[in-house]
Each structure stands twice: as C-alpha cells, then as structure tokens.
Image (cartoon, helix red, strand yellow):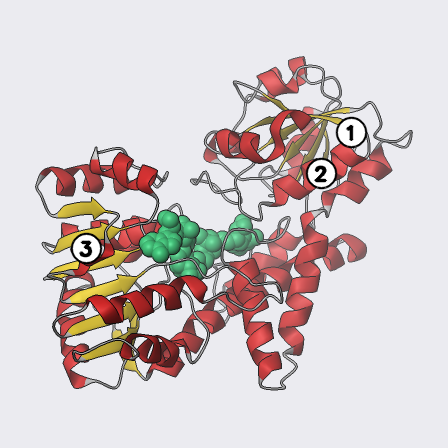
C-alpha cells in the first residue's frame, strides 16, 4: 500500500518505519527542514532501541521517503496518517491547531479517495472536526479514521510490531477494509483489531493513559502509607500484583510519572470532562499526587542535611523521564534539580542518553559528568532519578571510594535495603525502610 505519515516526530517515524518494514511504500512529511534533511540522508533523529536498523534498511531499499512538501507527499497515498503534536493549550485541553491546519490543507490537495487517520492523541469529537476541516475544501470522497497509538518510548518498535491490540474507529466499511489490510501483519499473534466508532476510539486512548497514570499515583500513595506504617511497598506490590485482576505491571512506585503523554493526557481528559460539566474526581487526585511525587525525595534530603542544602553538592544519576530514551519532557529529575539549585546546592549529573537535551534546557546551572562515577567526586550524596540498567548493579566499592558521604537517595527503588545496610550506606528509597548504618 502507499502510505503517507504527516509529522515525523516520535510516533510518525516509528509508524512510517514499521509500515515500510511490512512492505508498504511510505512517505513521511514534516515541516522541519533540518529533520527531513537528516532523515533523507540516513541520519535517525530519535533515540529508540531497534529502530535505526529498520530505518536504515527501509531507506536503503527504497520503501521509506522523506519530504517537506505535503502536496508531493500525499499525491499517490491511499492512507494518510496524521502523527502531529497535540500539546496542552493554555487551559490544559489538547491544542488541535496542528491537526486541523493540516486537515484543511489536505482538502485542497486530495485528488482521489483517501483514508485520513488520526494517529495523534486527540479528544473525543476530533475525527468529526477533521472531517469538517477537510470537507471545507475537498472535491473528492474520503474517510476519517481514529487509530490511536499505544506504543511506549524505549520499546516502541516492539509495541508497534506486536501490539496488544489495534483500535480502529470508523463507521465506514471501505475505510475499515483498508485499515484491516494494513494492520493484518501486526496482529498475527492473535491479538485483536478492535473496530469501534470514532468517539469510542478517541476516548479509549485517553482512558488507557489515565488508567495507567492512576495505577502509578495509587501505588505512590500506598508507598507513602508504607513508610508511615512500617510496611514494605515492594512486598505490597507483589502481594497485590499476583492477583490477575490487578496485574503485575505499572505498580512501581517512584518519583512520579513524566514524559510527553501521561501528564498532558490526564490533564486533557480532565478538561474534556469539564467541558461536559463532569468533575472527574479521581483524575484530579491522580494529578495532585503526581505533582507532589516529583519532589518526594526533597524533604527526605532536607531532613538528612539538618544544616541546610546551601553549599552542598549532589550527584544525580538519571535525567530521562524513564530508561532507554533521551526524552526529558516532564522528567522528575528536572524538578529535583530545580529544587536543589533553588536551595543553593550544586548538582552534577549523569545520564547515558539525555544529557545533551538537558544541557539545552538547564545549561550551566548544573555540571555534566562524562561517566556515572565522575559525578560522585566530592558529592555529599547520590540521588537516583531514572532506573537505567547501568545504575542497577553499580560498583559499590567505587561509589564508597569517591562519594564524600555514604548517602544515597533512590527515587526508583533499585537496591535491596538489607544489602545497603550491610554495605554501610545511609539509603532512602520510596515506600521502604531506611538503611541507617
Ligand atoms: N511520543 C509518544 O510516545 C507517543 C505519542 N502519542 C501522540 O502522538 C502525537 C505525536 O506525538 P510525538 O510523535 O511524540 O510528537 P513530536 O513532537 O515528536 O513530533 C511531531 C512532529 O510533527 C511535525 N509537524 C508539526 N507541524 C507539522 C505540519 N504542519 N506538517 C508536517 N509536520 C508537522 C513536527 O515538526 C514534529 O516533527 C501526539 O498527539 C502524542 O500525544 C501517542 C502515543 C505515543
Ligand atoms: O500515549 C503515549 O504517549 C504513551 O504513554 C505511555 O508511554 P511512555 O510515556 O512512553 O512511558 P511509560 O513506560 O508508560 O512510562 C510513563 C511514566 O510512568 C512512570 N512509571 C511507569 C510504570 C510504573 O510502574 N511506575 C512509574 O512511575 C515512568 O517512570 C514514566 O515516567 C504509555 O505507556 C503508552 O501506552 C502510550 O502510548
């Protein structure tokens, strides 16, 4: 099939590459000239494990093309995916201007039947708005489909290639057939394509992200309670997760959910609810808990350093909002850095992938180490903000030798408390006992 993907950011590039991998001819369109230039010359623009190999192969074999020209990009396409940004507007609702602008342009450019697919995360009713925006200028038949994306950064290729489910929202039989054929190679494992109406598909995406965020905030509150009541959140997590009705995944407490999606999508669903005069109480609490959780470690750090944080030096491991990505959007580490710097502390950071992105935002307010152990030099304590694998089994002798005090504040519960006790570290984590040698 001939496919066009408009918007070649995270989702667009993964979508385009994976459809090319299953034999389709894909053109990716983006207004960012620099990005298109890089991608056309074989330079990948995002860090995503496993993507580069597929990208290079499909580019070389001529199934993947990049352009800044929308007209040229959609000329022969049977299906056009819109993978455009939907950032929060001033009131927290999703800003649809990117999507609707392209929809209006498409109306002028289309010369034969096409299926236009909303891949972006968009509020209920957007498919109808996109339809209306295209119809304003269009002289040809078309269908608009809602096909939300559920991939996670860091495992995006696997999530796209082997999805738990594919949601296709349309009432058009013609579009349903096209989408079914396109996704057939991805659902061979027996996972379903769920056909539904556009509105249900749109709400499914927000409900999924909001439910996952709720699980996380719930566990973060359980963790607080564990600390107050002397229970261990790891045990409680295992205890409840073994029940199939609850499930083991997304029960890890920590320093709050970040990233480009959970924070914005939970907020957008709350705004959508308000528009229909519904007070979504649970989600307001989920957001509240998450705000507090991002700086959960700060009071612990302040309580430890009774003489204040002014002049103290901290080593910080992990900047990305989660491991295996260089994405720092809404990363809890940034909130921790801000709080420490505001208290007059010095911070030296290390992250395997995200340091260039942090440098752009935070600049020389902090120091950047070349190696995870370099930033421990002269530090009063180590703080862990992202659970990269390289941080899970560090050389504790080296930490001990370099770090000024044997003090670790761990926002991701990486180490066994008993072991830290034996190693002689003062060690605080989330929802577990404190190791006080
Ligand atoms: N990042 C993720 O993990 C996921 C994101 N989503 C949703 O997918 C959508 C896209 O997200 P990302 O890929 O992360 O965004 P992104 O910000 O990485 O990429 C968007 C791209 O669209 C381009 N663009 C903007 N206006 C354009 C125009 N008029 N014509 C052509 N290109 C244009 C930008 O230059 C940029 O390259 C959002 O609605 C997001 O919520 C859904 C699932 C996962
Ligand atoms: O709509 C989106 O963009 C995507 O949002 C999330 O994916 P992503 O943001 O890439 O990352 P997750 O793995 O979901 O993690 C999100 C945040 O939750 C935190 N988290 C996750 C799991 C957990 O148990 N505890 C926890 O604190 C992570 O540290 C991270 O900050 C969803 O998992 C995807 O299904 C969805 O497609």
Q: Nearer the viewer, residue 217 or 148?
A: 148
Q: Which mark is residue 428?
A: none
Residue that carries the numbered disc 2 in the rendered image: 338
**Residues at marks 2 and 3, CA–CA distance in whole angstroms:** 43 Å
Query: Which residue sits at x=19%, y=55%?
Result: 73
**Residues at marks 2 and 1, CA–CA distance in whole angstroms:** 30 Å
**Residues at marks 1 and 3, CA–CA distance in whole angstroms:** 64 Å
Query: Which residue sits at x=31%, y=83%?
Result: 196
Residue 99 seen in the current view: yes
Given this view, does label 2 or label 3 mark the residue nearer the observer? 3
**Marks 2 and 3 close (CB-CB < 8 Å):** no
Q: Position of residue 410 (x, y in %)?
A: 65, 38
* Between discs 2 and 3, the one toward the N terminus: 3
**Marks 1 and 3 close (CB-CB < 8 Å):** no
Q: Position of residue 268 (x, y in %)?
A: 55, 69
* Between discs 1 and 3, the one toward the N terminus: 3
The answer to whether 226 is drawn above or below residue 198 in the figure is above
The answer to whether 292 is drawn above or below residue 297 in the figure is below
Residue that carries the numbered disc 1 in the rendered image: 437
* Between discs 2 and 1, the one toward the N terminus: 2
């Amino acid at each position: 099939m001939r496919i066009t993907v408009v918007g070649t950011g995270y989702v667009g590039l993964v979508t385009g590459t994976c459809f090319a991998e299953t034999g389709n001819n894909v053109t990716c369109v983006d207004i960012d000239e620099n990005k298109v230039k890089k991608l056309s010359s074989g330079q990948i623009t995002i860090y995503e494990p496993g993507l580069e190999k597929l990208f290079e192969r499909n580019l070389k074999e001529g199934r993947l093309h990049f352009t800044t020209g929308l007209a040229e990009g959609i000329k022969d396409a049977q299906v056009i995916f819109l993978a455009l940004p939907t950032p929060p507007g001033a009131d927290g609702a999703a800003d649809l201007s990117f999507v609707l602008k392209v929809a209006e342009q498409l109306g002028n450019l289309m010369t034969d039947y096409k299926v236009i697919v909303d891949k972006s995360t968009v509020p209920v009713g957007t498919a109808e708005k996109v339809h209306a925006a295209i119809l304003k200028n269009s002289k040809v038949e078309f269908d608009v489909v809602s096909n939300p994306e559920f991939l996670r950064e860091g495992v995006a290729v696997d999530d796209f290639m082997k999805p738990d489910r594919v949601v296709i929202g349309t009432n058009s039989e013609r579009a349903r057939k096209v989408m079914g054929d396109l996704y057939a190679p991805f659902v061979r494992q027996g996972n379903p394509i769920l056909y539904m109406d556009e509105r249900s598909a749109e709400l499914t995406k927000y409900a999924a992200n909001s439910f996952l965020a709720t699980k996380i905030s719930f566990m973060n509150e359980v963790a607080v309670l564990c600390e107050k009541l002397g229970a261990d959140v790891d045990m409680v997590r295992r205890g409840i997760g073994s029940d199939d009705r609850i499930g083991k995944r997304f029960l890890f407490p920590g320093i709050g959910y970040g990233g480009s999606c959970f924070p914005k999508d939970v907020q957008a669903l709350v705004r959508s609810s308000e528009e229909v005069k519904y007070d979504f109480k649970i989600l307001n609490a989920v957001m509240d808990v998450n705000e507090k959780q991002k700086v959960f470690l700060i009071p612990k750090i302040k309580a430890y350093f009774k003489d204040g944080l002014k002049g103290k030096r901290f080593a910080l491991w992990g900047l990305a909002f989660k491991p295996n990505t260089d994405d720092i959007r809404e990363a809890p580490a940034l909130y921790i850095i801000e709080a420490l710097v505001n208290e007059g502390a010095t911070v030296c950071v290390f992250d395997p992938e995200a340091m260039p992105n942090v440098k752009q935002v935070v600049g020389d307010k902090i120091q950047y180490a070349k190696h995870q152990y370099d930033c421990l030099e002269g530090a009063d304590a180590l703080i862990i903000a992202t659970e990269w694998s390289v941080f899970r089994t560090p050389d504790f002798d080296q930490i001990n030798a370099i770090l000024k005090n044997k003090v670790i504040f761990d926002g991701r519960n990486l180490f066994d408390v008993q072991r830290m006790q034996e190693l002689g570290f003062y060690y605080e984590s989330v929802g577990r006992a404190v190791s006080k040698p």
